[in-house]
Image (tube, rainbow, N blue to C red):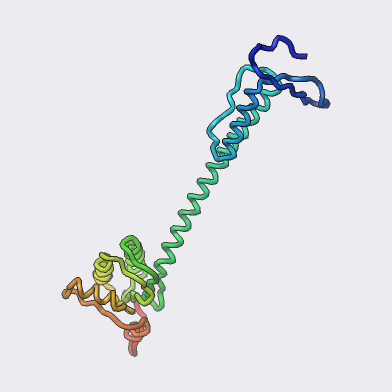
């Protein structure tokens, strides 16, 4: 029996559940307390885990329910943060994989590297290719590099100078660079740059470059 309840408030009578008994007594709960719990659960269902059920000084069985809801929300926040961290890790791994696939540098012969480029080329991708390719030239002491543009769809405006600078850098490292598979648009871009000081070695196909590099009398050696 509940006595001396404050007037002006709405109450709900609940059957209290306890050990070994499902009908031990009755607890009168303010409707506002139930509404607060429902409000927090609805917010959590919509992805908002930041709100909590306010815990008042109510020493009754329903206080355990309020504490339990807050504990559940804390667990949801922890799981959300763990999932977010895992998603960032997967995104980083995916980015690294995409970068690796975008620069598939192949050692076809001791001291000979081939880099087939497929798709569109922009400044960001050119920078990635430059870094990875030059690192491989140094680490493998390459003497020849074949840059194959057969699979290139488009070359973004302003990217061709970066590609030519990469060819220069390869030469400065002591390797000879052949560019194969240049399409008409790329050829026009190179001509428009008017860089006559650069001796760009171009061939139609990768096989042509390999035949020139690995012709009769060529020995497999590195610097």
x and y percent of residue 149 in the render? 34, 75
Q: Is residue 118 visible?
A: yes
Considering depth in this image, is 220 or 47 the residue closer to the camera? 47
Where 35 sits versus 75, above or below? above
Q: Residue at x 44, y 59 (%)?
A: 96
Q: How many marks?
A: 0
Q: In this view, which residue lies farthest toward the top?
A: 4
Q: In the displayed structure, does residue 177 sit left or right of residue 22?
A: left
Q: Is residue 169 visible?
A: no
Which quadrant, please, contains the N terminus? top right
Tell me where residue 2 sits by quadrant: top right
x and y percent of residue 104 in the render? 42, 69
Where 60 sits versus 45, above or below? above
Tell me where residue 117 sits by quadrant: bottom left
Q: Residue at x 20, y 73 (%)?
A: 192
Q: Residue at x 59, y 31 (%)?
A: 39
x and y percent of residue 166 in the render? 27, 68
x and y percent of residue 162 in the render? 26, 65
Where 135 sits versus 148, above or below? above
Which quadrant, please, contains the C terminus? bottom left
């Amino acid at each position: 029996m509940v006595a001396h309840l404050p007037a002006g408030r709405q109450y709900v009578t609940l059957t209290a559940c306890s050990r070994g008994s499902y009908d031990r007594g009755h607890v009168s709960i303010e409707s506002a307390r139930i509404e607060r719990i429902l409000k927090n659960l609805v917010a959590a269902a919509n992805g908002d885990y930041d709100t909590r059920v306010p815990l008042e000084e109510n020493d009754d069985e329903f206080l355990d329910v309020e504490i339990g809801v807050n504990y559940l929300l804390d667990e949801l926040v922890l799981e959300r943060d763990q999932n977010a961290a895992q998603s960032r890790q997967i995104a980083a791994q995916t980015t690294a994989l995409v970068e690796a696939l975008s620069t598939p540098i192949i050692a076809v012969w001791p001291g000979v590297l081939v880099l087939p480029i497929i798709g569109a080329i922009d400044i960001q991708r050119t920078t990635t290719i430059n870094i990875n390719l030059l690192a491989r030239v140094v680490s493998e002491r390459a003497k020849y590099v074949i840059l194959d543009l057969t699979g290139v769809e488009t070359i973004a405006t302003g990217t061709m100078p970066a590609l030519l600078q990469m060819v220069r850098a390869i030469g400065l490292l002591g390797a000879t660079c052949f560019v194969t598979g240049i399409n008409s648009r790329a050829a026009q871009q190179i001509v428009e740059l008017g860089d006559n000081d650069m001796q760009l070695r171009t061939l139609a196909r990768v096989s042509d470059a390999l035949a020139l590099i690995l012709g009769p009398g060529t020995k497999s050696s590195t610097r």
